[in-house]
Amino acid sequence: MKKTPFFSKIFMGAAVLSLSLGTVSCKDDKNDPAEVAEEQNEEKFDDNEAKEDDSEYLVMAAEVDMKEIELGKLAQQKATNADVKAYGQMMVTEHQKASDKTKELAQKMNVSLPMALTEKGQEAYDDLNDETGMDFDKKYIDMMVDGHEKTIDKMEDASENANSEEVRMWAANMLPTLRQHLDRAKQLKEQMDNNNM
């Protein structure tokens, strides 16, 4: 009988410890995946500013690819316009290819990448998921025009200003496909605007 308080104290201590560890891990889960990757890269390349700067381009690209893939999947499910559905399918296929190339280069350079959709990406997904019918189609294509314009600007910067020749080449190779995506999104936007769809 005398042992009971001792064991109950150990049990209570273990329970408190597991609760406190649970709280810590929950806090970690709240960290944005892109920020986590950037922090890891800062630590890795603490004495190599050029490599740290270049790692930011790869993190950005990985972030974009994940978002485009998830939004593309959503467009395949929810779009009412067949062309918009087809565009969503193209985004999934082509951004998966781009993601594979980015991962390959990141691995070679020992760069950490975000492992899940970022907070911004999740917000974009949730905003789009709230829409239905033609409103969904229009919002998705508007997002694609805006998103690809921003990504092209960043990739142009990488292709000209990255420190590593490999990163410059990688960015330059991504640009033609990204420009095609933007042109197609603009065509779809124009069609929808003209048809008042």
Image (spheres, helix red, strand yellow):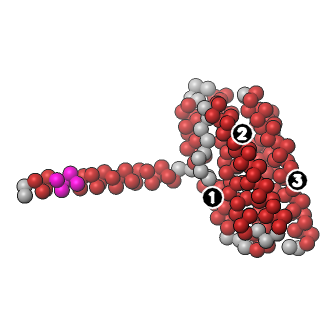
> Is there a contact, CB below 8 Å, between mark 3 and mark 2?
no
Residue at 60% x, 32% y: name it: 110
| Residue that label 1 marks | 122
State whether residue 44 is above or below residue 68. above
- Could you classify mark 3 by the number of other residues whose Cα lies within 10 Å: few (under 14), some (14-19), or many (20 or more)? some
Label 1 vs label 2, nearer the camera:
2
Q: Position of residue 42 (x, y in %)?
A: 57, 34
State whether residue 50 is above or below residue 99. above
Under circle 1, the secondary element is helix
Work out whether residue 93 or residue 127 is closer to the camera in this orientation and state it: 93
| Residue that label 2 marks | 101
Instruction: State how far apart marks 1 and 3 are (Cα).
Output: 25 Å
Q: Mark 3 is on which residue type? A: Asp
Q: Position of residue 17 (x, y in %)?
A: 31, 51
- Dominant secondary structure, magenta: helix
Q: Mark 2 is on which residue type? A: Lys
Quadrant assignment, res 120:
bottom right
Residue at 73% x, 59% y: name it: 72
Q: Mark 1 is on which residue type? A: Gln
Q: Which residues are magenta?
A: 7-11
Quadrant assignment, res 75:
bottom right
Give the tally of numbered discs. 3
| Residue that label 3 marks | 183
Along the horizontal axis of the image, is 158 left or right of 5? right
- Could you classify mark 1 by the number of other residues whose Cα lies within 10 Å: few (under 14), some (14-19), or many (20 or more)? some
Q: Residue furthest right?
A: 194
Under circle 2, the secondary element is helix
